[in-house]
Amino acid sequence: MTAPADVRVEVRPPWPFRLGGGSADGLLRRRGAALQRLLRVGGEPVLVGIVQPAADRVLFAARAATPEAAREGIARMRFATSVDDDLRPFYERFANDPVIGKAVRSRPALRVRRKPSPWEALVAAITEQLIEFERAVTIQRRLNAVYGYRCPATRLRDATTPAALAGEAPARLCAFDLAPRRAMALRRCAEGVARGRIDLANHDFRRLLAMRDIGPWTVEMLALHGQGRYDLVPAGDLGFLKIVGRLVTGRPKARADEAEVRGFFARYGEWQGLAGEYLRAAAASGLTPAPRSPDRLPRPAGTRWSVVDGRRAAA
């Protein structure tokens, strides 16, 4: 029997980095000072451990059947943690931004939490459509418990695969608390990926958007959390609709529409996705500026108001 291969890699992050905790779906777990994640590469299990012994060093260690599989597992987790991303250009441009600047200065190590594969990001996005996050995470845990791979030695699990869901009846998926339309969408996507009709590593989303119940929010979540694209923000996210609505109207319970959210984030250009994470952090910490009162803004007679570049202006 061939001995397992162990591969270790030391990474020097190019920008301040702080190793986070486990994932809500239970696949990435903290054990002591280390994070652990079980992955499959070519059908074979790969166990990846991550530890940060110093602020400027992050250690990745992987055990697999072959060195190639171990290195691939490490590469996926380096992507998931964003450890290699140099965020200095973002910091230099937006450290003094009137909306997120305080959050940027106080939390320079903030990252977008990614999935180690685009498929995982797509499953998460579909299950999170139109329901509370906690309920969606419960669905994800149930799917992984039934369809994912479990390693008895570590008691860790890997996520379900497209092939595992492609032949499943939608009614069976509904039993996991998925709404019927979400179940159908998940099955269609699984079948498309499993049969090679959909390439999730490709940034062309036309095939996905052509599917029923797959809209811009879903593919933007895939792009941000599964492909590492900072240039897209999930503008239809309820949290953004609330935060932007409050900021631009001065009314605590106001909600923007999707077009207004896109207009708000346009100022951040190719960094919109990361700016969205900072807007959430700023709102949660009370670091966003006080909402502008509409009564204090000039209002030309006979005009309709919309959000342009984060300000209320005549449409």
Image (tube, helix red, strand yellow):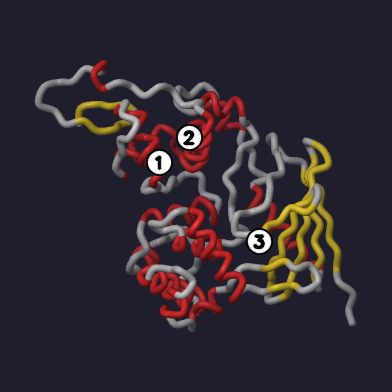
What residue type is disc 1 on?
Answer: Phe
The tag earlier along the polypeptide, 1 or 2, is 1
Residue at disc 2, secondary structure: helix
Q: CA distance from mark 1 to mark 2?
A: 8 Å
On the rendered structure, is 66 left or right of 29? right
On the rendered structure, is 228 left or right of 261? right
The answer to whether residue 244 is seen in the rendering is: yes
Residue at disc 1, secondary structure: helix
Query: Which of the numbered marks, if any, corresponds to residue 279?
Result: 2
Residue 178, compared with residue 220, is above or below; it is below
Residue visible at 39% across and 35% down?
Answer: 243
- Label 3 or label 2, whichever lies nearer to me, is 3
Few, some or many residues within 10 Å of mark 3 (<14, 14–19, 20+): some
Residue at disc 3, secondary structure: loop
* The quadrant where residue 312 appears: top left
Query: x, y percentage for residue 305?
Result: 21, 30
Residue in front for this viewpoint, 98 or 8: 98
Q: CA distance from mark 3 to mark 1?
A: 27 Å
Residue position marked by numbered label 1 in the rendering: 240
Query: Which quadrant is home to the N terminus?
Result: bottom right
On the rendered structure, is 233 left or right of 293? right
The answer to whether residue 59 is seen in the rendering is: no
Query: Which quadrant is home to the C terminus?
Result: top left
Q: CA distance from mark 3 to mark 2?
A: 26 Å
Residue in front for this viewpoint, 307 or 33: 33
Residue visible at 79% across and 51% down?
Answer: 34
Residue visible at 77% across and 41% down?
Answer: 12
Residue position marked by numbered label 3 in the rendering: 27
The tag earlier along the polypeptide, 3 or 1, is 3
